[in-house]
Image (cartoon, rainbow, N blue to C red):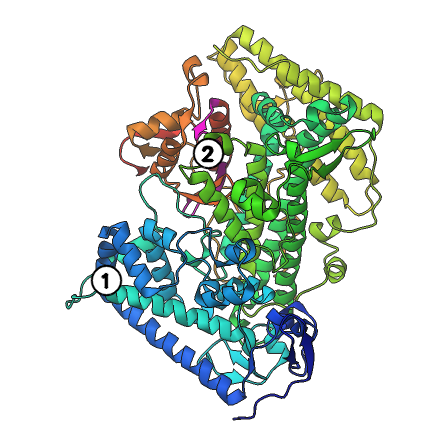
Amino acid sequence: MNTRKPIPFEAAFDPSSGDYISIYSPPVGFCSCVDCENQFRSTDSQGIDRLSYAEALSTAEASEISISYAKDIRKDLQYLRDQVACHGNTIISRWKKRSREKRAAALLKAFPKIFPQQWSGPIINYDYANVTWRKAREFREALLLPYLNLEVLRDDALKFLGLLYNRTKFDPEDWVSFDSHQTRTSWATGGFRTDFAECCIVFYGLNYGEVVPWNSDQAHRWDIIGFPRGRLVLEAQHFIMQFLRKIVEDLLDGVDRVGLSDKWIELGNSGFRRSFGAETWSAFSNQAYSAPVFDVDRLVSISQARLAESEDHLWLLQTDPAYFQMFIKNETQGRIFKENDPEIWNRNVALNAWVEPVGKMQTWRWVVQEVERMRAQYLKFRDSIHVGERLPSKFEFAIASLELLLINLLLHRTKSLGMLLPRMIAFQDLYKHDYSQRDQVRITIDLKKTRSTREMFYKDPLHWCLEQMSTDPENPKMFDAAMLFGFLDDWLGKDTTSVKDKCRLDQRLLSDLSDLAANHELLAVVRQHRPVCKPTSIEEARAKGADRQAWRGMQTGDEKYKQSKQDWEALAAQLKAVLDLPFPKGKHDRAWLESADQVRQNLKNFWTKAREMHRKALEHSKLYTEEDKQQELATMSFDSTIEHLAVLKAERDAILAPKARTKPDELVSDDAGTGWNIGPAMKLPSTSLLSAPKSKTKTRPEVSTSNADVAEAPKTPVIEKTKIPPLAIIQVKPESMRVLTRMFPCTPEEYSGKPVDWRSFVGAMEDAGFPAAQSGGSAVTFTKEGEGRIVFHKPHPVAKIEQTVLQSWGKRMGKWFKWERETFVCGSAGVS
């Protein structure tokens, strides 16, 4: 092996030190792409003092370092696996029983330089506490493992157990993507002392940790990583294994008998749930304590749940006047809606009520279709996918296209967040609003009121966090998105955060943050895949994906259709009519029905006008197919579906003629628009791309008997429905019964009932078979194994669910899971 040290390519003068910096050439084949520059520093970047190499090592020296790390990692991992297999229950019991002080002592003994607080870690201190880059390098281990801190591991016993569980369950090569991502910011900003060597480190298989020459194809797949960056990954894995081993050795001190590990296995299978009725932590903002592997089923379930939520939102906006009125009220709180020109106000509100919800559903539909296409290719070729080998071309393009779509949607959502903040009451005073131009509002930051970024972090952490979230998510020098969402969750949950501060986050903002978090999470899962795919360009994706909605929808050059002033005025008038007449409350009698009919008719008029305007815009589009247009218009026609008309007819019958019953397929909307006449009906085609409950997906593709490419997803994918009896009975506890039946009110007292406590709702849902997990922002995902998942948003700032919201959730559970009031009976939990 070569023992000769590399020779500098040239030298650059460093004015700060008065010395010359040695600059080393990257290996032959190094290009200026992101992947290459994340493994070796370019010759241009090395001219900056903090980005220069500290030392040049021979290949033999580099090999000795990396093999030593790999050997220790395997040794410590085997020790930890043996201990959790033999003493898992003891580890759980002893760690949980320790006081916070004793846990802190053990953590400090294993990691003396661990940072004391969660959000005063090395990266933030490096930027905001006036710490020089030379001083920051003294905290190398903390920069390698920025998620480790005394506060979290001391206060939350399950976090250490989750860390130990997942680090021992999965191999080091499964953690390469995560561990390399954790070093991204400090690599880009020069936080690490790095050495140069003309070789790469292998990160898969039996040769894990060995050094090899540069190979462009393998480096772009991250099968091998250039020594300067690869050493950081090995060093991080070496340190975390040592850290865990020291604590386990301390916990098992004096234990000489083999014990049991059934509770250890059960804890891992439960997702480290704290107690009955509690949400498990978010897998995205707690990646260090969760499984690190690429999970195609997780991609499918997350994207489908988001599509279902956006579809349900549109459905409720069209069919539930009380929900629509509540939504518009929440949307129009900011000054911009009160000080603006009335014409612009009307247009902005109409956009929020129609264009934005339709656009959100459209983008989630694109994601579902691209995920399904990638999944089909993955199932077809997965036996041919191995780390260290080239990816099958069709699968590689499918996952690269999905990644590109998610990146573009992420950029759009971060930009939208930045535009949303000035519209929020809580932040509007930090911006100047210029109404001098009739057709638009110019918004700029008020420099007299907006603090510097550093001051903002300490004095207004919420605004700091939101501003960071609205920056370029692909910039490695910016804060990691998972860290920012963890920061937000922690800030919201702290007792020291005042209710007044929490009130600055309204439901609209939280909803957008939840979509942003889901987008980030999907992208993070895609990037867990190894080998890493070759990136595709947007031009290539458009050329090859012209048959798919996402790439037709993202085409440029299509002229924008401008609605006429008369159309906007007409729509505004319809909107005003809906808002001026509140949906009635109280006893459901004839008077209530007459008032409800009028409000529903006003809402129907609004959506009829919105559909007319949207149809004009679609007809003007040159890129949408006729099928695209019909599908999009169908998502704006829920108020005309046979299912909705059946519900209205049943409600009318219950009030006017309780004994009379009419079958749903006998309903049709009449010419007058009341929607309750009896006669032959024509069902609209379903627009849903998914259904819950859904059947279990096969893990192997069907054998094809034709030459057709079975991996190509259909133009309108539909997930097969599982037939479940409409009156499947679920036995729940009495306290759960009281909550769940409130989702389907039938008495005046229930319709006007007091808000339901969020924790009681989560407990009732778990009792009914739907445990909860945090999903980012206000979103909480409730999942029933084998049937599907649904997303509800935790109320904010007070965790109480208003009856209108609870009732809308009941409608969604009825739509996807066939729930109704009669579904529940008192008894032990579980389906009978």
Q: Is residue 174 left or right of residue 516?
A: left
**Circle 1/circle 2 CB separation < 8 Å:** no
Q: Is residue 442 left or right of residue 265?
A: right
Percent x, y of residue 620: 83, 39
Q: Image quadrant of residue 643?
A: top right
Q: Is 491 placed above or below 18 here?
A: above
The structure residue drawn at horizontal position 83% and vertical position 49%, both measured from the top left corner, is 557
Q: Which residues, given as a range, are shown in magenta?
A: 783-803
Q: Which residue is mark 1?
A: 251
Percent x, y of residue 635: 66, 35
Tag 1: Cα neighbours inside 10 Å, few (<14), some, or many (≥20)?
some
Q: Is 662 placed above or below 149 here?
A: above
Amino acid type for the residue under numbered disc 1: Leu
Q: Which residue is mark 2?
A: 818
Q: Secondary structure at mark 2?
A: loop
Mark with earlier residue (1, 2): 1
Q: CA distance from mark 1 to mark 2?
A: 49 Å
Amino acid type for the residue under numbered disc 2: Lys
Instruction: Judge whether residue 785 is colored magenta.
Output: yes
Q: Is 733 placed above or below 462 here?
A: above
